[in-house]
Amino acid sequence: MENFWHTFRKLAFQRTESTQVNEQHSSGNCSTEQVSVCCSSRISYVETILNEPCTAPAIYLTALTHRSTVHDNPGHESRESNQRLEFLGDAVLDLIVSEYLYTLFPDSDEGHLSSNRAKIVNRKSLAGFASAIQLGQQLIIGESADKRKIRESESALADAFEAFVGAVYLDKGIEKVRMFIMNHVIALVDVQKLATIEHNYKSRLIEYTQAGHLPAPHYKVIREDGAEHEKTFTIQVSVDGRILGTGRAPRKKDAEQAAACTALRTLKNPEETS
């Protein structure tokens, strides 16, 4: 199994190294003359965060590349944003945090563990972890996105943090990424206190409807705003044909949580919404 992961990381390195080093920074706050300086400063940042040299610098430059650079420069086919690494980092975060919670709460069931993980690994908290290491200042973004202050966007910061985790995993392996997550995620939250707070509104709404012998909640996207790479979703939730709330967020699942929160207030305090 260890040989499998070693081969997997090696293949990922080969692909990224061959497509990214020469073109990754020809835009997004770096003029052609400043490319090497921009790359060098960002790699220095990475090595400071990791407290050791990185052996695959291109993978980190990809992790720092916001998708707006691709949309603003569609002719550069070899340029890659951090979206694929975000996908990988999301899975790695879930694994390490799940493992930690599994060990910390030996008597908790699956539902409790999932709820606690959601409190740690969510858009808001991930953006906070990114801000704590000043990740936004290192992002490579398109000119149009820069004008909209994407560096401060919760969505962009959360995505970049997940992508960075993916890069650390590919470069350093499971033990190093576990150490990074323990230092820059787990160490920043009071997990024991967090476990006593319930804010998984979708789960609570399902429990509420089941207790009342009502149909399951139905979520529907009623509006999408913004450019393709920076969408905001408005989602409506209804129960038994009755619209109970709406939510708006950059990610569908976060908008659903917001809608479920409103629905719970509607169900529990109907006089406030009548």
Image (spheres, rainbow, N blue to C red):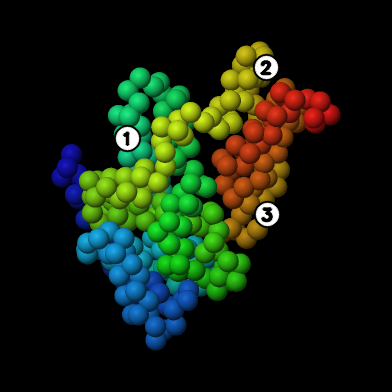
Q: Is residue 255 visible from the viewing direction of this image?
A: yes
Q: Secondary structure at mark 1?
A: helix
Q: Which residue is mark 1?
A: 100
Residue at 46 percent of width and 63 percent of height: 136
Q: Which residue is mark 3?
A: 225
> Mark 3: few, some, or many residues within 10 Å (few <14, many ≥20)?
few
Label 1 or label 2, whichever comes before in sequence order: 1
Q: Amino acid at mark 3?
A: Asp
Q: CA distance from mark 1 to mark 3?
A: 37 Å
The x, y position of residue 172, in whole percent, is 23, 54
Quadrant of the drawing holding the C terminus? top right
Examine the image and state in which quarter residue 108 appears.
Answer: top left
The x, y position of residue 116, in whole percent, is 45, 32
**Residue furthest to the right:** 274
Q: Is residue 91 visible from the viewing direction of this image?
A: no
Q: Amino acid at mark 2?
A: Leu
Residue at 36 percent of width and 66 percent of height: 61
The x, y position of residue 248, in whole percent, is 66, 45
The x, y position of residue 14, in whole percent, is 25, 61
Label 2 or label 3, whichever comes before in sequence order: 2
Q: Amino acid at mark 1?
A: Tyr
Q: Is residue 270 above or below residue 75?
A: above
